Image (cartoon, grey):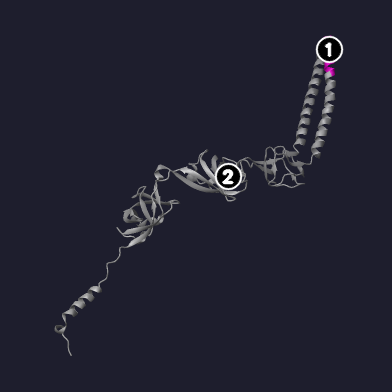
Amino acid sequence: MTFTTKSWPIGCFSLLALLAGCAEKPPEAEVVRPVVTVTIEEPSLTIERTFSGIAKGEIDSNLSFRVGGEIRSLPARIGARVKVGDVIARLDPTDYELKLGQARAMLAQVRAQFVGADADFTRAKSLYENDNVSKSALDTGQAAYESAKAQMEASEKQVEQAVQQLNYTILLAPQDGSIGEVPVEINQVVQPGQVIASLVSEDKIEMHVGIPESLITRVKVGSKAVLNFESVPGEILPAVVSKVGIDTSTTSTYEVQISMLKHNPLVRPGMVGEAVLIFERPASERFITVPLVAVAGRLEERYVWVFSPAGAGVGNVAKRPVSVGDLTTSGLQIREGIKPGEIIVVRGVHRLEEGIKVKLLQNFPN
């Protein structure tokens, strides 16, 4: 049997129309993109820079003998604490005791000569006053007296010098502190001025750091700083610049001395740490900075996505052209295009389109 459309019941057409209607796709749901944002802050007025260094005693003395000789005693030990007047080392005093003995013997002889010359001169003056000797005899007696007196005074100074040299065979601590180095040994013969030990102060700690030429003009005595040490985690120690070098070192940097403002018994000389210096940022460098990932586009057309909240963590985004500057440790400088207080997208920027809705996942930490 052959069917034609003329033979179809009207109900079949109704059924086909109903089926065609059921096959139509439902309207697509509105796309809401998840994003992470950051709020633009006011440009920083300061710059922080970190430099590595080693803690030192603020008073760092190289101790040495004023005379030479053989070391007979060396109580100093690395790390030992000493007080003012404690013995650091002793030299063999034998030679200096002999010199002192010889000087004293010579002084005794010269004194005897002076006593005789003084007596002769006194007698010559008495005889001259009574016209019993000539003026030339008086002058001769006076000359002998003055010569003997000069020899005695010179001998007395030689004795004083010999006593001092003997005393110099004992090296004493000039101040309280700790022994940093002892580069000599017992029985070693040392020369005057040769370093026997170094003495550092534990009460006043400082750090020496190298500052590059680009920053040294901003460092002044009294500039604020903070110190932290690997061996003392969690301790942020206030400090101040106490000395600024005027010549570059072998590393083409200027040495800057930074002193702790308050004693901390946990910090000791030799500890490795960092110094954070705070510089005033020049007006020409006070730019807004944003994370590098927030800026999209090519070099000639850079832009960010500005977020406008609409409530309940949802909002819209709009493309905003920006003029960028240098990439710094704190982010990419923005010279024009956004201002403090605005919110920009920092994650998900490459999936955004003008005017679409976005859902805020979290605020990016500044």
Residue sitting at x 38%, y 58%: 35
Instruction: Look at the image and tell me in which quarter the N terminus lies.
Output: bottom left
Report the residue that reaches farthest toward the top: 130
Residue 108 locus on image (x, y percent): 84, 27
Amino acid, disc 2 = Met
Q: Is residue 176 left or right of residue 339?
A: right
Q: Which mark is residue 126?
A: 1
Residue 118 locus on image (x, y percent): 83, 19
Res. 31 image quadrant: bottom left
Magenta range? 119-134
Q: Residues within 10 Å of mark 2 (few under 14, many from 20)?
A: many
Q: Which mark is residue 303?
A: none
91 and 41: which is toward the camera: 41
User: Which residue is the site of mark 2?
Assistant: 207
Q: Is residue 30 left or right of residue 200?
A: left
Report the residue that reaches farthest toward the left: 6
Dominant secondary-structure state across the stretch colored magenta: helix
Among the two numbered marks 1 and 2 on one chain, the one whose residue lies closer to the N terminus: 1
Amino acid, disc 1 = Ser
Report the residue that reaches farthest toward the bottom: 1
Q: In what element is the residue under mark 2?
A: strand
103 and 165: which is toward the camera: 165
Residue sitting at x 81%, y 39%: 94
**Does 123 appear in magenta?**
yes
104 and 258: which is toward the camera: 258
In this orientation, does residue 245 appear?
Answer: no
- Front disc: 1 or 2: 2
**Does 329 appear in magenta?**
no
Residue sitting at x 77%, y 36%: 166
Residue 143 locus on image (x, y percent): 79, 20
Q: In what element is the residue under mark 1?
A: helix
Relative height, residue 50 to residue 174 (above, below): below
